Image (cartoon, rainbow, N blue to C red):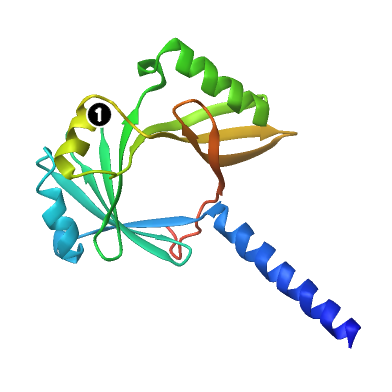
Amino acid sequence: MYKQLYYLVICCLLGIASAKAQEDIKAEKEERIEKSAMPAASLKTLLAFPFERYAYYKEIDGNIVSYEAKTKRTDPDYSIEFDAKGRLEDVEEEIKKRSMSKAERKLLQQKLDSIDQQNKIERIQLQYLPNENINELNKRIANKNFDHYELVVAFKNNRTIYRLELLFDRQGKLLKSRKVTRIAYDFILF
């Protein structure tokens, strides 16, 4: 009896650990879609932003489906992400490392070096969360009053290259880390 209970507990713990490990992997597949394929609520929300032209995408990350509108012909580039029902999840603004203050760059670099000494930032985004109405969110975006830094960083350790998506708060505290994997597409280019 105790032996069976022991095995049951071990199996449950392994299942939980496996599910947690799956959460920590970013295996995102993105495909361009027509505007008509976006959730109606998302299209209504997009009207409140000051951007005129978008490219529309559907993203699948594991079992999670989301939609994204990326600005076209703007500098900087923005992506506005929605859940499957069209509710606003976040706005991300892609920035260059040189646009950060020296103190911000130094702080983030120290955090990256603590993960692995050989690293290269591939992408930096400022993340704005929709904690208020869209007009207030637009003001925060205009004033660069963001919530988080989101980075994709390539690391090299013992000749092995791996990538992580890292989410930091404004004080440089690491909030989330996910391994980035490349998706093998089911087609061959000739």
- The crowding category of the residue bearing disc 1, from other C-alpha atoms within 10 Å (few below 14, some 14 to 19, many at least 20), is few
Quadrant, the N terminus: bottom right
x, y (%) of residue 106? Answer: 53, 15
**On the image, numbered disc 1 is attached to which residue?**
76
Residue drawn at 28 percent across, 26 percent down: 144
Q: Quadrant of the C terminus?
A: bottom left
Mark 1: which secondary structure? loop
Residue depicted at 78% across the width and 75% down the height: 9
Lateral position of residue 123 relative to residue 15, left or right: left
Point out residue 171 in the picture as x, y percentages from the top left corner.
Answer: 48, 25
- Identify the image quadrant of residue 161: top right
- The outermost residue toward the bottom is 1
Q: Is residue 124 above or below residue 72?
A: above
The x, y position of residue 10, in whole percent, is 79, 72
Q: Is residue 64 visible?
A: yes
Residue 179 vs 18, above or below: the answer is above
The image quadrant that residue 137 belongs to is: top left
Q: Residue furthest top?
A: 102
Q: Is residue 132 above or below residue 42?
A: above
Residue at 26% x, 66% y is 85
Q: Residue 100 at what x, y percent from top left? A: 39, 18
Q: How many marks?
A: 1
In this image, 17 relative to 24: left or right? Answer: right
Judge from the rendering whether residue 104 lies leftward or rightward of residue 40; answer left or right: right
Q: Amino acid at mark 1?
A: Pro
Residue at horizontal 59%, vertical 26%? 111
